[in-house]
Image (cartoon, coloured by chain):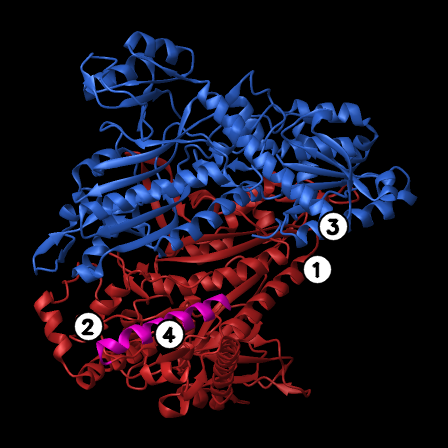
Chain colours: A red, B blue
Amino acid sequence: MGALRLHSLTSILASSSSTSVSAWSPSIFRRHRRVRLRPRLLTTANFSAEKEVSPVTEDRRAKRSITPRSQDFNAWYLDVIANAELADYGPVRGTMVIRPYGYAIWEAIQDYLNVKFKETGHSNMYFPQFIPYSFIEKEASHVEGFSPELALVTIGGGKELEEKLVVRPTSETIVNHMFTQWIHSYRDLPLMVNQWANVTRWEMRTKPFIRTLEFLWQEGHTAHATLEEAEKEALQMIDVYTKFAYEEAAIPVIVGRKSKVETFAGASKTYTIEAMMGDRKALQAGTSHNLGQNFSHAFGTQFTDENGQRQHVWQTSWAISTRFVGGIIMTHGDDTGLLLPPKIAPIQVIIVPIWKKDDEKTGVIDAALSVKEVLKTAGIKVKIDDSDQRTPGWKYNFWEMKGIPLRIEIGPRDVSSGSVVISRRDVPGKQGKVFGISMEASVLVAYVKDKLDEIQSSLLDRATSFRDSNIVDVNSYDELKAAISEGKWARGPWSASDKDELRVKEETGATIRCFPFEQPEGQNKACLMTGNPAEEVAIFAKSY
Amino acid sequence: MGALRLHSLTSILASSSSTSVSAWSPSIFRRHRRVRLRPRLLTTANFSAEKEVSPVTEDRRAKRSITPRSQDFNAWYLDVIANAELADYGPVRGTMVIRPYGYAIWEAIQDYLNVKFKETGHSNMYFPQFIPYSFIEKEASHVEGFSPELALVTIGGGKELEEKLVVRPTSETIVNHMFTQWIHSYRDLPLMVNQWANVTRWEMRTKPFIRTLEFLWQEGHTAHATLEEAEKEALQMIDVYTKFAYEEAAIPVIVGRKSKVETFAGASKTYTIEAMMGDRKALQAGTSHNLGQNFSHAFGTQFTDENGQRQHVWQTSWAISTRFVGGIIMTHGDDTGLLLPPKIAPIQVIIVPIWKKDDEKTGVIDAALSVKEVLKTAGIKVKIDDSDQRTPGWKYNFWEMKGIPLRIEIGPRDVSSGSVVISRRDVPGKQGKVFGISMEASVLVAYVKDKLDEIQSSLLDRATSFRDSNIVDVNSYDELKAAISEGKWARGPWSASDKDELRVKEETGATIRCFPFEQPEGQNKACLMTGNPAEEVAIFAKSY
């Protein structure tokens, strides 16, 4: 993906000014099912008048439009999404329009994962989204899990349909229907495919990116000759997700196995990556399922093995969705707004040219353009904000709010000295600002790349410390309750029943997020609930 | 996009053997709405026995499974899709599963266009697919055009919905609903976005890729301050499509303007690229619409201009869909099967190592692997078929049927002489075969690149000659009827009424495909139907 072109930049700048007058307050995200009032119309006269406002007042206004994160995490989240123009609500309750800046983050996720999926032997393809209702009913736990959430097409081409069609909530059923026709012998295995698609789940409580009626995802589906191969595949894919989370999104997820209660409807085992958000709630950020033979039995997906015997295939499925974008916002964002890890950022460097007098402008803009060209050639995603409409201060705030990792400032004095000023988004104020970096291509490129790497790992370190300081080891239910009531994650030995697990949920609001792969050393653990021997620790937390 | 990994190669090889026993005959594409019988199951014993079949018999069988194109174009088309594993039918009538090989062609289309869209200033984003029914009714000609084709969701989350939801057949209405909220002043314009998405149209007569109930496409949507800008944009995008068709897909489309009768429901003007298929029917392969202010009036999409006046925006929309894959098949394919232009081919070069004795195998495979590595490093999409299961002859036929532009054969004698044999897919038999091409990296890469270029332009030339020899200039309705009845395209001066145009359709089955941008020189044309002065020639043809 090349540098992102935001042709609607004028639109961003213009509409952000209306932001400050509260029309874009989070309330627009809380309203459903009615057409929103248009923000107060600003005439050209109003626009011109605004230019007269002193930079200081203006800057404060731009800042004020985001609720401080510490004050109200949810309001902050919705403010960031609105102000950074990541998404907007669609006209149908619970649907979301993903705006260019938000979509560019999704494209960065796609670009990385798509390569990894192909490297690990998967081909992309596409299954229809309409699934006969009868398919959903074939796998017992699947229908139980999904039937309350289905959207159904009952009319097509002006006629009532004989059989209702499900708008896919996930594709295991239609995938198995097709696999059954394509798989004949062991030579057809493994069959490993993926699709990038939209899915629909009729959710009652929605939240942009995190839980929407329609969302985008990739769903991988594979069929294998043996349980071992399916298990290996399920683990391989959760590993791809884990690496992506750590290395690209700078999110230190905890990878593990879901409890039986929390396992995907139709799976034998579900592996998950769980991320701690800024409010310390857990976000299930990706899952990989070992489906066993559940769907192959339901759909008769069989193959003839090397001995001429008919066998049911062993399967997996795995998915990451646009929810991950929400996870990035809620992991790294701060009071200033969005903060994007460089590897995921649609714009990694924003250049702000600074001039006061008209005769300074040309030199400054020329220098900015040549710096841009140098960085772009080096593969850095860079953009210039050379608009006449806003003060440098306003631009600083604006692009900080948009989460751009690095800012380069170029003024007339920098032009004469052949250097620039570089500011880090993750280190506020003077501390993050370095003066006198040479404009000389090799020096500048090396410095910028180095800083981007530094920001990337600094974000991961920061999130890891935050995570670790908010996980409490517990050995009793009382300790668990105390940790959860403090808003933390509780990690403790667990071998109790499903009923006990549900009791914890009822009484504390926390669920088992996973049995982490990384288990503490030492033997003889006692279940925090029953005192019986427990082989593993589980992590409990409240979640999205 | 790197070299395509077809992990289901064993599956391709295995299931193709069942092809020859007619289970994959085109009839599977004509049946709807019932679960297909599984192809006769081949036990391992059967597979082993097949190996005993002499290459000749086997080769003939592989060939026989495709109906000759000249004999029955439609059966040929369906046979190619089934045999090359491009697509399969979904369980719901008229839906299509796009299989990995077919999807890889779509990915090649996406990769090219996505870059061009960004270069021309568009950002990707995503609009929800559920549209309130009332939206569709807002633009009069739009609802008239689309209402017979709608799929409607009436039940969500177990409850009857208050308002029926349309599964998007196209997104102009929801786009305008959102644009109305985002556009305030002239500074917000132009607003230029695109989405890659699925769309649903309840078509009665379906055909894989060409017309399916659900298909994939991109739809661009833009808003501008003036008619001139919108017109320029609509023309720019049809130009992007035209270049893509010529330079990548080697399809010599005719670009022009649709007649009023054939204009998109809701547009002021529709520009189109029309491609001539192998059966000489026209395929509308991409369209770009100048929407005027039709949707902005219907949805109140206004902006404040530089003089402080409220104005309605001027808009465009433009789309290319998975239908284009069908166009590629029907333009270049022949009796042998698919034939892919190198720039679109998921695999550009197939390497077939040839050995008889086991002691030859290692040397041949090693040489093949090193040739593969050399080509891959040079950015060529290459694959080796080193399976033990099939004879070289079988492999030749198989990969020719799959349309791979170049084949490299490497036998023991080639290994000793350090050379390879290279065969062109587009030149059958000995004429397309060149012996003794050195394996030396620089020589081989240059040769292969050169040949791929040659095939690319040769396919375009061939299609252009075919097109030109099948367009007849006509000056009267009788001449038009004669040309159409011969299966050709008729080009002649036209200034008659919509009613006359519909009469032509009724009486000949042909429609105006477009008024081509490229008009013949010379003045004083007389309308072929009325004899009145006509400013332009139109092209009439039967179409898909």
Residue B354, quarter of picture: top right
Q: Secondary structure at mark 2?
A: helix
Please state the horizontal and vertical placement of residue A313, each as a whole percent of the image: 65, 49
The percent coordinates of residue B500 (x first, y second) are: 21, 16
**Residue beneath label 3, please?**
B441
**Which residue is depicted at the point 24% across and 41% down?**
B290
Which quadrant: the C terminus of chain B? top left
Which residues lie in the magenta part?
A: A356-378
Residue type of the residue flagged with mark 3: Ala
Whole-Å distance between the Cαs marked 1 and 3?
A: 41 Å
* Circles 1 and 2 on the same subunit: yes
Mark 4 chain: A
Closer to us: B158 or A127: A127
The three-letter amino acid code for the residue at tag 1 is Glu
Identify the residue at image location x=32%, y=75%: A363
Between the C-alphas of marks 4 and 2, the distance is 28 Å
Residue tagged by mark 4? A367
